[in-house]
Each structure stands twice: as structure tokens, then as C-alpha cells.
């Protein structure tokens, strides 16, 4: 299948490479020359413009920073330039309203579009083990599924347009809350004189069991290997977690949803980000409690 890939950053670069590994012909575009060079080394054909990249393709995949850029790219360079009927897969994490708006624009012009944000981080993007939560019609999901399966381990149809983004921001709000809870508990146990590894061994096999503790332990040298063991480099950056929390807070306000813990998590990550920690993995929030 001939696939255009727009947006080759930390996530998109690995995703495009996995499409090539799975036998697809990938036409790649990014504003970064470095990203384009890396994509070329991974077997992609590179282009200097999105309009050129989408010519004659069967599908378009995008991984972009925010909703304004997604809307601009699709309205200016994809819709009307990619062949009618092309499957469009936006894997960015953006606001629900923009996801629905862009899908409506694309559908009106004869395209099959889904919003398909991801969970798993850079390692999963490189390893082809991402989880995709997908919003769109049954027809659009059917067209997108085999492409997504070339980049991930799980592809779940969440519902109509925008449902993928809804699932993503709610999931990451929960993740932020649970990581803060794990950080607080681990630091409190340590200050009370309990060995952190012993706390991990106990809590990870009892009612404290959760992904933030068991699979992403935020304290170096404790539990499984995680970004904490690499000085909080790599993984899921604080800046990205804060972006998702801001999206979640805006969505909660729109529908008058009560999210006191989500709001507190957003506030804590705002402070942590403001202290110059944007580039650190979000689990570095545990530093706040030392």
C-alpha cells in the first residue's frame, strides 16, 4: 500500500519506519531536514511538501503537534490533493472538537477519516507495539485498521469521530493522577523508613497494583526498568502530559464534568513544567516530593 506520512518527530519517525518494515511504500514529509534524513535512512521516500507527498496514495497518516496544525495540514494540503476515497488517519492528540471538524470536512469530500491517537510512548512507536484508540465510522475504521495494525499491538474502535481523542485525554488524565499517587506513596514509605524496593514488592502485588507502579516505576533502581533509571530521559515528556491534561480540562469544562483530581494533577504538572522540567519524563514528578 502507498502511504503518505506527515509528521516525523519522536513518535512519527518510528511509526513510519514500521510501515516500511511491514511492506508499505511510505512517502514521508516533515519540516525538519533531520527528520526527513532519518526517514530516508529507514526506507521512506521523502518530500519537501505535504501536497507532493499525498499524490496518488492509498492512505495518509499524520502525527502532528496540535489541533490548529492538523486542521491546517488537512484543509490546505491533504483534502483535495490526495485521491478521493483515500483513508485518512490522524494519530495526533488534539481537542475533540477539531477532530470532529476535520473529519466532517474530509467526509464531505469523499474521504474515509479516523482520529487514532496512540498510547505507548517512543519505545512502543519504535517497536511497533502502540495501542490505537480510534474514532470514526465503521467504514473508515475498516479502511484504517490494517494500516494501524502495522504500527501497533492493539487497535480499538472507540466510537464515532472524536471518540479516539476522548479516550486518549481521559486515559492520560487517569495516568497523571495515578503517577502522582504512586510518587506520593513511594516517597512517604521511604521517609517512614520502609525500603522502596520492599514497598514496590508489596504494593505491586496488592491493592496498590497499577500501571504507573508496576510497569513504569518512578523511582530509580526500584521495580522494573523505566525512564527513572535513565535520569528521566525518553519516555513521555512532562510537556506532552501537560498538553493532554490541558485538553482534558478544556473538555471537562465544555461538558461540565467534575474532575477535582484531574484538575489537581493538571495544577501540579503546570508547576512542575514551569520549574523547567518540560523535557523530563512525566514520572519525574516524584522529584517534587523529595
Image (cartoon, helix red, strand yellow):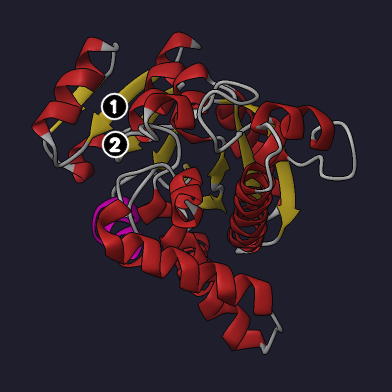
Q: Quadrant of residue 222?
A: top right
Residue 136, image x and y in percent? Answer: 64, 55
The question of residue 132 being in magenta is answered with: no
| Position of 258 relative to 230 (above/below) | below
- Depth check: give the residue in front, 12 or 60: 12
The question of residue 70 being in magenta is answered with: yes
- Depth check: give the residue in front, 211 or 21: 211
Q: Secondary structure at mark 1?
A: strand
Residue indicated by mark 2: 9
Residue 61, image x and y in percent? Answer: 42, 39
| Position of 243 relative to 200 (above/below) | below
Residue 181, image x and y in percent? Answer: 67, 55
Total numbered badges shown on the rendered structure: 2
Q: What residue lies at 58% left-to-right and 59% top-to-bottom?
A: 165
Which disc number belongs to residue 27?
A: 1
Q: Nearer the viewer, mark 2 or mark 1?
A: 2
Q: Secondary structure at mark 2?
A: loop
Q: What residue lies at 54% left-to-right and 48% top-to-bottom?
A: 117
Which disc number belongs to residue 117?
A: none
Q: What residue lies at 65% left-to-right and 46% top-to-bottom?
A: 133
Q: Residues within 10 Å of mark 2 (few under 14, many from 20)?
A: many
Question: Residues under labels 2 and 1: Cα distance?
Answer: 15 Å
Q: Which residues are magenta?
A: 69-79
Q: Residues within 10 Å of mark 1 (few under 14, many from 20)?
A: many
Amino acid at each position: 500500500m502507498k502511504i503518505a506520512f506527515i509528521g516525523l518527530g519522536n513518535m512519527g519517525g518510528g511509526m513510519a519506519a514500521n510501515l516500511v518494515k511491514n511492506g508499505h511504500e511510505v512517502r514521508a514529509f516533515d519540516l525538519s531536514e533531520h527528520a526527513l534524513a532519518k526517514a530516508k535512512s529507514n526506507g521512506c521516500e521523502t518530500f519537501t511538501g505535504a501536497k507532493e507527498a499525498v499524490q496518488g496514495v492509498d492512505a495518509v497518516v499524520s502525527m502532528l503537534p496540535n489541533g490548529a496544525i492538523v486542521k491546517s495540514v488537512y484543509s490546505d494540503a491533504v483534502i483535495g490533493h490526495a485521491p478521493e476515497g483515500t483513508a485518512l488517519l490522524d494519530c495526533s492528540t488534539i481537542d475533540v472538537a477539531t477532530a470532529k471538524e476535520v473529519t466532517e470536512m474530509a467526509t464531505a469530500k469523499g474521504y474515509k477519516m479516523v482520529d487514532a491517537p496512540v498510547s505507548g510512548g517512543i519505545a512502543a512507536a519504535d517497536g511497533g507495539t502502540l495501542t490505537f484508540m480510534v474514532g470514526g465510522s465503521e467504514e473508515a475504521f475498516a479502511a484504517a485498521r490494517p494500516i494501524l495494525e502495522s504500527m501497533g499491538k492493539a487497535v480499538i474502535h472507540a466510537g464515532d469521530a472524536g471518540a479516539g481523542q476522548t479516550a486518549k485525554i481521559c486515559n492520560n488524565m487517569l495516568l497523571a493522577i495515578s503517577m502522582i499517587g504512586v510518587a506520593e506513596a513511594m516517597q512517604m514509605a521511604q521517609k517512614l523508613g520502609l525500603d522502596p524496593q520492599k514497598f514496590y514488592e508489596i504494593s505491586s502485588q496488592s491493592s496498590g497494583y497499577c500501571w504507573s507502579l508496576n510497569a513504569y516505576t518512578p523511582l530509580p533502581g526500584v521495580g522494573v526498568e523505566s525512564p527513572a533509571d535513565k535520569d528521566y530521559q525518553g519516555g513521555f515528556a512532562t510537556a506532552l502530559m501537560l498538553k493532554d491534561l490541558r485538553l482534558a480540562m478544556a473538555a471537562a469544562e465544555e461538558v461540565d464534568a467534575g474532575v477535582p483530581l484531574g484538575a489537581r494533577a493538571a495544577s501540579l504538572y503546570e508547576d512542575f513544567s514551569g520549574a523547567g522540567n518540560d523535557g523530563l519524563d512525566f514520572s519525574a514528578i516524584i522529584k517534587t516530593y523529595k
